[in-house]
Image (cartoon, helix red, strand yellow):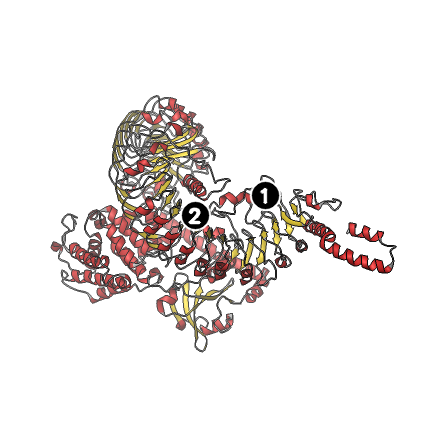
């Protein structure tokens, strides 16, 4: 007001009438221009005073300045009115910062901005004085540490067009009504802490072009009025709590919509067909939701679509050829085994990013193959569909493929040969076809030398690994991390997928993040012959390149391929794995001289002979050396002690002799030392006690003598130790956790073993000695060698167990008394929390007291089911109002706060296959859930679905192929609640599928098909109803599982296992009528009969007959009955009780193991 006050002072002596006229004119002028200038300056200073400015961003904002339009971040009109306030920060302490921007590569297409290099940061609550900037059009303060709610006055600003507060710590909800923002074009509040639903008041912002609420805690549903914004260019709602379906209204007026991002929510239902109307759509990101049904053919109308990501949902059906009409499509992601969200450590109150990272599995379940219309798309750069259950012949037509750079079809069911057409894809640098059923030979024209990833492992490829030819390699983008600006959608996906491939590999890829990592994997195939050349292009060599050549589990033969090391000197690091082949001959003596960058060499389980070259220590960069299970002789060269970074040294299973070099004690980085099953003599070097990082020491099955170094008991890192079957003597070092009797057996001169382990040692502790069976080896058992008066292991275990139990009981009693005595408020706190949190109004008040009273204080007469987490009770809250109360075992949860946070999430979910969670109660002493009442099994499992029988079928199939019950007594060592499903999953994860099957079945049937059937059964028992396959898909997958033999394995499985089971119950069976060997070429007995029934049913399905769709489950039940009837013919005595047992299994009745 300085300028106005000076004018007034000059007019002080005017006459009163003239003064009044002058004042009236002055007030009008002051309000429109002069006073507006001072008002703007004052509002800016008010904003500055409300914020902390640790980095001095607003240092130029001072009251003595005459020109506020020159202040940092301020833009004015010609008449000096503030039009824009634009200050981008460098980060905050909240959920998101500009520096974290690259960690979200598939977010914000079209609105991303470059992160500034400065550390600018403003903190505090946004001042309501901003609203005094009446001419303000742009308020942009992203990536600071602004807190609190957006002031109400800002929502009333009439001329504001851009409200951009992305990446702050703004909280609260959006107002349900406000009077301003009629001119708003951009609302960018992404990555804050906003809660609540998207209010209908936003519908008044009719000119809205950008709506960004991503990365908050917004719940409810996507409102239909979003489709009413005719100028809408981008909708960004990813990473929230949104549920429900994608509204059809969003596709009614979407002609200008370019970017639709709703990933990382809880959206259900199908993809709306009406999205095909959004003719301008460039990116459609729907990943990490719960979407179901099929891909609409209408998406083929999106002629400008560049990126389509449908991964990590529950989408099924075939891939529509109509997508081939999307002529601009560059990125198609149908499945993704890597979560697109970074791994974060979020507390319960933070945005749901951490929760979404726990959803780390892919559930899309497609049928058929990739249509040729898609493989020939002219601008396709990325086709990504690993583990998507795709099948059929590998695509043979890839068009001109001028743009194709990344192709991932790993872990599917493709058969046939790898198409020669890929040889023409000159830009291709990533090709992963691993774990399919591909056959034939590799052609030498494939662009393998130029690829950063070439993975064909886990197939049935044959022939030799060719000497691949190429003319020149194209340049590739830098994949050292996440992309930087400029941010183009397809490039963002290229960078992200390549980077995640690198960090997800189990290989130790060395060097900093700036290295170019190249992986060529030919492992687990049927390749033969000798290696002709190292398949890496000269252009890819360099001091920034880490190269991994993997060819294990093949039939490669001939002398040790010295050419593996020829280019090693031109690399930053090299990794070689040629284990489990038929390589023979000697290790090239000069290999270590020309390959100093070798980091990992695994040539185990070959036929390599001769000695280890004496200059082997020149491999100075080695971290892992595995030459175990070969034909090596001679001594360990002392030069190995020069490899200072060596962490793993495995020379087990050879014929090495001499003494163990004491110089190995100088390898201070060594973690694993395996020298078992050789002919080493002499004493165990005392220098080994200097290996302070050692975790595994296996020296068993040698000729070692002398004493075990006593100080080995003090190597605290050691977790696996074995010196069995040597000639050791003297006392045993005392280490109760390590040196138990099982680790020293077969040493008759060792003094009596008094140390016992209460748990059986693992196989690692016993030593990795191949087929050596300790149980069968001649040795003196602990009980035989104990001195007189000593306790045996059973007695010690019993005494120790009793002591432990008694001690625990005493501790619990003491703790109980202590807390009751010294925490008198606890009782009040518990009673104070006796409330019921309600999500759904049922017309009757729910209280803790009326719930308990309605269940009769959880009386057994009201119990309608028991499960792994507690019992379910029927409760009539008021006349005619029935609910189901699931009383939970308090000990099942880590704490009330965790349970409280998680159950609130569930309370927001709405899905037709989930019963409604009405409410819950959680306190330190009582927890229960309130559901709408359903009868019988469904009240117990809280699920209603037409896929319930699929789960039951999966359990029955698991029982049949394993000959175990769903809750078999043999599972008791794994603890309560462990069932046949958990057992199957455990064995599959550990690569021990063979152990699941009965011995006769595994020996008789084709192993690949049996494992596929086990996978099928496990898929049937997934917990999520939305991701569980339909019965039609199950039968279709069954067909795929048995195509390789052309016969019916499952029929044999069903018949044989039922025969064995019934025989153990005393039933008799005519063995002469059954071919126990099961020759697939003959397929005699009821395997053929059952196969005929299956084929007849499936022919009707393929023809669209009456068994298609919903009736298929009934047909499968009929099929099982046919199996049973077929077996009865040959059984002399039929037990009605067993028939009832089979009927029970077929009906899927039982406890929670049948899962609804």
Instruction: Work out how far the residue at label 2 is from the one at label 1, CA to CA, in angstroms.
Output: 26 Å
- Residue of label 2: 339
Q: The residue tagged with tag 2: helix, strand or loop? A: loop
Q: Is 1077 on the left or on the right of 542, as rendered? A: left
Which disc is residue 168 wearing? none
Residue 17, compared with residue 137, is above or below; it is below
Mark positioned earlier in the residue sequence (2 or 1): 1
Write the residue at 74% across / 45% down. 66
Q: Is 315 on the left or on the right of 895, as rendered? A: left
Which x, y percent locates residue 544?
44, 30
Please state, as top left, top right, bottom left or bottom right, where the C terminus lies in the image: bottom left
> In the image shown, does 278 or 390 lie closer to the viewer?
278
Which x, y percent locates residue 396?
28, 42
Of all residues, the one furthest to the bottom in this rendering is 879
Say few, some or many: other residues with alpha carbon within 10 Å of mark 2 (under 14 / 14 to 19 / 20 or more): many
Figure quadrant of residue 464: top left
Q: Is 104 on the left or on the right of 316, as rendered? A: right
Q: The residue tagged with tag 1: helix, strand or loop? A: loop
């Amino acid at each position: 007001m300085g300028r106005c006050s000076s004018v007034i002072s000059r007019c002080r002596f005017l006459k009163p009438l003239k003064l009044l006229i002058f004042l009236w004119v002055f007030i009008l002028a002051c309000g429109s221009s002069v006073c507006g200038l001072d008002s703007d300056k004052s509002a800016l200073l008010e904003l500055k005073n409300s914020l902390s400015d640790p980095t001095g961003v607003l240092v130029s904002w001072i009251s003595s300045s005459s020109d506020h339009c020159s202040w940092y971040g301020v833009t004015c009109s010609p008449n000096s009115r503030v039009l824009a306030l634009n200050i981008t920060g460098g980060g905050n302490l909240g959920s998101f910062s500009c520096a974290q921007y690259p960690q979200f590569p598939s977010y914000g297409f079209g609105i991303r901005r470059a992160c500034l290099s400065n550390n600018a940061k403003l903190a505090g609550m946004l001042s309501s004085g901003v609203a005094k900037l009446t001419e303000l059009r742009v308020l942009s303060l992203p990536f600071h540490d602004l807190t609190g709610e957006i002031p109400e006055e800002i929502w009333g600003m009439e001329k504001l067009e851009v409200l951009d507060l992305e990446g702050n710590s703004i909280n609260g909800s959006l107002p349900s009504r406000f009077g301003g923002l009629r001119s708003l074009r951009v609302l960018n509040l992404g990555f804050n802490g906003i809660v609540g639903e998207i209010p209908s008041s936003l519908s008044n912002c009719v000119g809205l072009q950008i709506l960004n609420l991503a990365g908050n805690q917004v719940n409810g549903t996507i409102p239909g009025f979003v489709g009413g914004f005719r100028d809408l260019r981008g909708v960004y709602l990813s990473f929230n709590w949104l549920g429900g379906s994608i509204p059809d209204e969003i596709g009614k007026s979407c002609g200008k919509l370019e970017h639709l991002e709703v990933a990382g929510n809880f959206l259900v239902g199908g993809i709306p067909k009406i999205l095909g109307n959004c003719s301008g759509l460039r990116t459609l990101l729907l990943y990490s939701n719960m979407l179901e049904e099929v891909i609409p053919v209408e998406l083929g109308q999106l002629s400008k679509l560049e990126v389509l990501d449908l991964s990590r949902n529950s989408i099924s059906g075939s891939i529509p050829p109509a997508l081939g009409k999307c002529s601009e499509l560059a990125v198609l992601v149908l499945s993704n085994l890597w979560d697109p969200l970074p791994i974060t450590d979020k507390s319960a109150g933070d945005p749901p990013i951490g929760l979404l990272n726990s959803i780390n599995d892919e559930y899309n379940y497609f049928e058929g193959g990739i249509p040729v219309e898609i493989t020939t798309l002219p601008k396709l750069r990325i086709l990504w569909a690993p583990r998507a259950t795709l099948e059929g012949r590998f695509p043979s037509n890839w068009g001109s493929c001028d743009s194709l750079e990344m192709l991932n079809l790993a872990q599917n069911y493709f058969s046939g040969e790898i198409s020669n057409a890929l040889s023409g894809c000159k830009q291709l640098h990533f090709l992963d076809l691993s774990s399919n059923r591909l056959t034939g030979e590799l052609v030498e024209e494939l662009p393998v030398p130029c690829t950063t990833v070439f993975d064909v492992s886990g197939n049935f490829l044959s022939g030799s690994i060719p000497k691949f030819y190429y003319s020149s390699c194209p340049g590739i983008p830098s994949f050292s991390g996440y992309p930087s600006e400029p941010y183009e959608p397809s490039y963002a996906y290229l960078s992200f997928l390549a980077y995640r491939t690198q960090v997800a590999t189990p290989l130790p890829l060395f060097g900093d993040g700036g290295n170019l990592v190249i992986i060529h994997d030919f492992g687990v195939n049927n390749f033969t012959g000798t290696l002709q050349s190292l398949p890496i292009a000269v252009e890819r060599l360099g001091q920034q390149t880490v190269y991994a050549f993997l060819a294990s589990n093949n039939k490669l033969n001939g002398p040790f391929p010295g050419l593996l090391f020829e280019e090693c000197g031109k690399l930053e690091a090299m990794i070689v794995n040629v284990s489990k082949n038929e390589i023979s001959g000697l290790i090239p003596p000069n290999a270590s001289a020309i390959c100093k960058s070798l980091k990992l060499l695994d040539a185990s389980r070959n036929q390599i002979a001769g000695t280890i070259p004496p200059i082997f220590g020149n491999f100075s960069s080695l971290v892992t050396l595995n030459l175990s299970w070969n034909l090596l002789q001679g001594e360990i060269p002392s030069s190995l002690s020069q490899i200072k970074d060596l962490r793993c040294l495995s020379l087990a299973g050879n014929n090495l002799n001499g003494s163990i070099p004491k110089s190995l004690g100088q390898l201070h980085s060594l973690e694993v030392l395996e020298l078992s099953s050789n002919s080493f003599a002499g004493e165990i070097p005392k220098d080994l006690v200097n290996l302070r990082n050692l975790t595994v020491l296996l020296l068993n099955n040698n000729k070692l003598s002398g004493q075990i170094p006593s100080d080995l008991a003090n190597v605290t890192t050691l977790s696996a130790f074995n010196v069995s079957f040597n000639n050791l003597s003297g006392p045993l070092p005392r280490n109760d956790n390590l040196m138990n009797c099982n680790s020293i057996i077969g040493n008759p001169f060792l003094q009596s073993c008094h140390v016992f382990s209460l748990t059986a040692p693992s196989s690692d502790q016993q030593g990795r000695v191949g087929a050596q069976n300790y149980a069968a080896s001649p040795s003196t058992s602990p009980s035989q060698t104990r001195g007189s008066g000593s306790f045996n292991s059973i007695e010690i275990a019993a005494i120790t167990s009793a002591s432990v139990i008694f001690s625990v009981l005493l501790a619990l009693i003491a703790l109980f008394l202590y807390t009751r005595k010294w925490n008198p408020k606890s009782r009040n706190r518990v009673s104070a929390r006796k409330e019921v949190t309600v999500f759904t109004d049922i017309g009757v008040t729910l209280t803790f007291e009326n719930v308990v009273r309605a269940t009769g204080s959880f009386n057994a007469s009201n119990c309608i089911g028991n499960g792994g987490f507690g019992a379910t009770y029927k409760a009539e809250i008021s006349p005619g109002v029935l609910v189901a109360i699931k009383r939970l075992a308090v000990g099942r949860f880590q704490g009330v706060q965790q349970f409280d946070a998680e159950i609130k999430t569930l309370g927001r979910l709405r899905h037709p296959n989930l019963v409604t969670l009405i409410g819950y109660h959680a306190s330190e002493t009582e927890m229960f859930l309130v559901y709408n009442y359903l009868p019988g099994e469904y009240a117990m499992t809280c699920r209603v679905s037409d896929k319930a029988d699929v789960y039951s079928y999966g359990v029955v199939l698991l029982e049949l192929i394993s000959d175990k019950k769903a809750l078999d007594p043999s599972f008791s060592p794994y603890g309560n609640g462990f069932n046949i499903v958990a057992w199957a999953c455990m064995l599959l994860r550990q690569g021990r599928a063979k152990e699941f099957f009965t011995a006769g079945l595994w020996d008789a049937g084709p192993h690949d098909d049996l494992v596929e059937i086990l996978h099928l059964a496990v898929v049937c028992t997934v917990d999520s109803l939305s991701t569980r396959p339909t019965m039609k898909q199950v039968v279709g997958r069954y067909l795929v599982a048995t195509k390789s033999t052309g016969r019916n394995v499952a029929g044999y499985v069903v018949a044989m296992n039922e025969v064995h089971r019934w025989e153990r119950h005393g039933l008799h069976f005519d063995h002469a009528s059954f071919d126990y060997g099961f020759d697939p070429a003959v397929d005699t007995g009821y395997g053929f009969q059952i196969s005929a029934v299956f084929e007849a049913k499936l022919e009707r399905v393929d023809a669209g007959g009456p068994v298609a769709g919903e009736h298929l489950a009934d047909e499968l039940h009929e099929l099982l009955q046919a199996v049973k009837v077929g077996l009865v013919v040959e059984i002399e005595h039929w037990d009605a009780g067993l028939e009832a047992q089979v009927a029970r299994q077929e009906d899927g009745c039982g406890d929670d193991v049948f899962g609804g």
